[in-house]
Image (cartoon, rainbow, N blue to C red):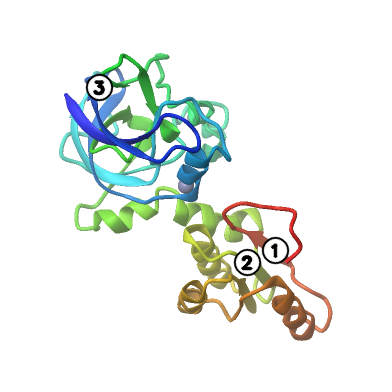
Amino acid sequence: MRTRAAIIREPGKPWEVTELSLDEPRQGEVRIAFKASGLCHSDEHIQTGDSTGRLPMVGGHEGAGVIEAVGAGVTRVKAGDHVVCSFIPACGTCRYCSTGRQNLCDWGAQMMTGMLADGTFRFHDDGGADLGGFCMLGTFAERAVVSQNSCVPIDPYIPFEVAALTGCGVPTGWGTSVYAAGVRPGQTVVIFGAGGVGSNAIQGARYAGAAHVIVVDPVEFKRSKALEFGATHVYASAAEAQEAVVEMTWGQLADHAIITIGVLSAEVV
Ligand SMILES: [Zn+2]
Ligand SMILES: [Zn+2]
């Protein structure tokens, strides 16, 4: 089968939309027709070279679609199911999955290569190169073959463009506030950056009962959206926020600082 896909061949070069050949699903694998995909900054990190993966690679790790075909031994989904893909697979049986830490599934070791369980790749270009999908997915392809362990079935009434966001940005941001930081009622949280991850960190902090959800972002549009998502205060710079945090916490400062900006640098703002 042929599929169109957006790929990266070399860091620093733009996304290339091209046609690839796609193998049939093997043991435990499924073929998905993606209907919606987010563009996460982690994809851009591959394009810019800020993070390095095995290239060439099909981009995208935040997608939802329909299962078109299943390989042998597939039990979690069937043809016709609507699914959202997880950016880390959950095999269910490794040490971490079996102790409730699916976010550390052993299979995640291949996120940056896209190699599937039998050590091979399903995407191939016309020059004979094998391509992995980012996070073992490649949601920037119209079709992809992925492990059933990367798929979570969803009810068919859920719009694909909404479901896709729960593949990375929503759990990453929400989980950072609610689980990693463990925000408690009454606390003060400062969130740097109100993009896809940050806007979900805002919602998580608000849900967890933070008294002050303070957002720092230089982009006016993001600051106004942050207020809709539950921020109590928004500032364009860290310096402005610092002054306000000192004031509103009687000098005790924030309980948590959550950094969800694109690229960290050593510049003093
Ligand atoms: Zn992501
Ligand atoms: Zn696992």
Alpha-carbon span between mark 1 and mark 2: 6 Å
Residue 200 vs residue 19, the one in the foreground: 19
Among numbered discs 3 and 2, the one appearing first in the sequence:
3
Are circles 1 and 2 on residues that touch, CB within 8 Å?
yes
User: Residue 208's image quarter?
Assistant: bottom right
Among numbered discs 3 and 1, the one appearing first in the sequence:
3
Alpha-carbon span between mark 3 and mark 1: 43 Å
Determine which residue is flagged by label 1. 257
Q: Position of residue 48 (x, y in %)?
A: 52, 41
User: Residue 128's image quarter?
Assistant: top left
> Could you tell me if residue 210 is visible in this image?
no
Pointer 2 local density, CA inside 10 Å: few below 14, some 14–19, many at least 20: many
Residue 48 vs residue 191, the one in the foreground: 48
Among numbered discs 1 and 2, the one appearing first in the sequence:
2
Alpha-carbon span between mark 3 and mark 2: 42 Å
Residue found at the very far right of the displayed protein: 251
Direction from residue 200 to residue 15 in the image, left or right: left
Determine which residue is flagged by label 3. 25
Q: Position of residue 178 (x, y in %)?
A: 58, 60
Determine which residue is flagged by label 2. 191
Q: Residue at x 21, y 31 (%)?
A: 3
